[in-house]
């Protein structure tokens, strides 16, 4: 079977053919976090789905150029940073660092580029100016807006009838004095409530709207056309719809070839909500004693386009599955690495059985994953290999090496063998404070904070990229 994905744009499964097929390169963009708080488990389902997609593309032999944005200027960020009387960068750096540590804990591989919105204002201004020049955008007293009536294909991703659509809360928060109710903000002129958060630009003093950020960052790092764009289904409208409109109106080219969206996560069968007491960040779950690998397994174990019901009992079951998976690999790997002097036992009789087991598991795993990343039958194929592999007696080194090599290749997609616990937020914050002290050459304060970090059981080491933290 050829690799195929369900494309939100066409509402059908399509055989995957990257734009740069001759170079075997896939350009992929993932909507990243808005860093005003710790990301919750619903967010991490989206990032794990994207991670599985990326890793399976690499498994298939593609080179993947991946970009995930950091939204570090937005209404909620401004509101919450002002409440804490913190500068924008100081406020967002704290949660950005925590997010990076969570990615590492869940073994979500880092993208090639992690652009921040605040570092791409010139690119946003350029797109907005082009839209103004084309008379697709217009100015009002409070901002610059995209006129959706000037983009005939508006709605092609979400397949909605705009005349029958009520403006959602997120949309309403995005715009003010516009000509049409569905028009969206590209640029917001400075207002007193924004405090000192603004940029002086050729299009006016102000800050970007939410949607323009992703278009500017994706085109900066991936070009005007990309293969895959991912995100949760809640982003289809208006965010991704608006990305398409402003990008294609600007360039005249198709923005994205394949749109992949993951469904919601429920907690104990209900929508996640702080008022219901079922709102969890990754750190909330880890404090209950669960391991990152178990959380990763639960979040990846159902098809990305299906709702996932997240329960603590589900994590218990996931933990058992991960333990079984890891114990099998450890046992096989130990046999594979025995000293050369150890004689293989029944090597020849087992060899054919092992080769058949691996071939069958590989075929079923790839058939499932090629079919729009059908993860459940893919996992079933691997655990059937584990079940049958545990029955083989007197397994020799060469056969064990074949199995361990296969598991390692599969785990390059699943990522279950190397997940680890993240650094606590308070330790991350101390490390950020120490970094600021070092930049100011306040060595006494830097040493004091280092000692405080050490007292909490962690070691911080300076590196060319900033600092590294390890548990003592």
Image (tube, helix red, strand yellow):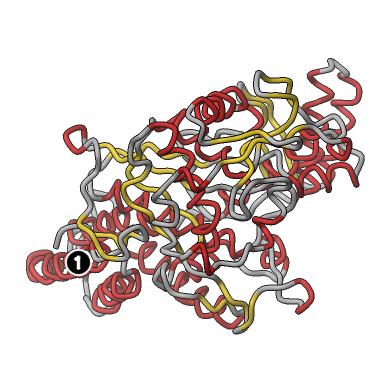
Report which residue position mark 1 lands on: 367
Q: Please state which of residues 140 and 197 is positioned toward the viewer in this rendering.
A: 140
Res. 142 image quadrant: top right
Res. 343 image quadrant: bottom left
Question: Relative to 10, is 423 above or below?
Answer: above
Residue 186's x, y, as percent?
61, 38
Residue 112's x, y, as percent?
45, 34
Q: Residue at x 87, y 40 (%)?
A: 193
Mark 1 crowdedness (10 Å alpha carbons): few <14, some 14-19, many ≥20:
some
Question: Relative to 276, is 24 above or below?
Answer: above
Name the side, left or right, on which 281 lies relative to 448. Answer: left
Q: Please state which of residues 306 and 12 is positioned toward the viewer in this rendering.
A: 12
Name the side, left or right, on which 345 lies relative to 271. Answer: left
Residue 71's x, y, as percent?
64, 42
Q: Residue at x 63, y 62 (%)?
A: 167
Q: Please state which of residues 356 and 343 is positioned toward the viewer in this rendering.
A: 356
Residue 413's x, y, as percent?
35, 55
Q: Is residue 472 visible?
A: no
Q: Please state which of residues 309 and 260 is positioned toward the viewer in this rendering.
A: 260
């Amino acid at each position: 079977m050829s690799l195929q994905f369900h494309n939100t744009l066409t509402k059908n499964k399509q055989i995957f053919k990257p734009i740069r097929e001759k170079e075997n390169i896939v350009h992929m963009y993932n909507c990243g976090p808005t860093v005003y708080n710790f990301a919750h488990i619903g967010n991490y389902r989206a990032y794990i789905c994207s991670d599985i997609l990326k890793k399976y593309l690499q498994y298939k032999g593609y080179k993947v150029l991946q970009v995930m944005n950091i939204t570090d200027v937005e209404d909620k960020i401004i509101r919450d940073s002002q409440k804490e009387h913190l500068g924008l960068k100081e406020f967002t750096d704290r949660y950005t660092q925590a997010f990076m540590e969570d990615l590492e804990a869940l073994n979500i591989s880092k993208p090639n580029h992690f652009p921040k919105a605040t570092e791409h204002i010139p690119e946003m201004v350029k797109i907005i100016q082009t839209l103004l020049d084309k008379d697709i955008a217009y100015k009002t007293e409070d901002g610059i807006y995209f006129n959706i009536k000037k983009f005939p294909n508006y709605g092609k991703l979400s397949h909605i009838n705009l005349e029958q659509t009520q403006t959602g809360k997120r949309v309403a928060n995005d715009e003010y004095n516009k000509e049409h109710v569905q028009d969206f903000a590209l640029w917001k002129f400075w207002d007193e409530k924004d405090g000192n958060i603004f940029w002086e630009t050729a299009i006016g003093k102000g800050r970007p709207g939410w949607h323009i950020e992703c278009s500017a960052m994706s085109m900066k790092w991936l070009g005007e056309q990309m293969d895959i764009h991912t995100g949760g289904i809640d982003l289809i409208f208006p965010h991704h719809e608006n990305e398409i409109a402003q990008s294609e109106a600007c360039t005249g080219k198709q923005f994205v070839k394949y749109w992949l969206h993951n469904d919601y996560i429920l907690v104990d069968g209900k929508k996640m909500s702080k008022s219901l007491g079922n709102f969890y960040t990754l750190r909330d779950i880890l404090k209950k004693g669960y391991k990152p690998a178990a959380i990763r397994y639960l979040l990846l174990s159902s098809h990305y386009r299906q709702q996932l019901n997240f329960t603590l009992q589900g994590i218990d079951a996931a933990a058992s599955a991960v333990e079984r998976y890891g114990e099998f690999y450890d046992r096989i790997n130990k046999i594979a690495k025995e000293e050369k002097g150890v004689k293989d036992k029944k090597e020849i009789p087992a060899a054919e059985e092992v080769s058949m087991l691996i071939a069958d598991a590989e075929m079923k795993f790839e058939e499932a994953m090629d079919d729009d990343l059908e993860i459940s039958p893919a996992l079933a194929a691997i655990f059937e290999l584990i079940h049958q592999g545990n029955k083989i007696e007197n397994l020799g080194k060469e056969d064990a090496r074949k199995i361990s090599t296969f598991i390692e290749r599969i785990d390059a997609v699943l990522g279950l063998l190397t997940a680890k616990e993240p650094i606590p937020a308070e330790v991350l914050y101390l490390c950020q404070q120490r970094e600021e002290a070092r930049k100011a050459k306040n060595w006494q304060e830097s040493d004091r904070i280092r000692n405080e970090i050490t007292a909490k059981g962690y070691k911080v080491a300076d590196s060319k990229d900033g600092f590294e933290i390890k548990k003592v």
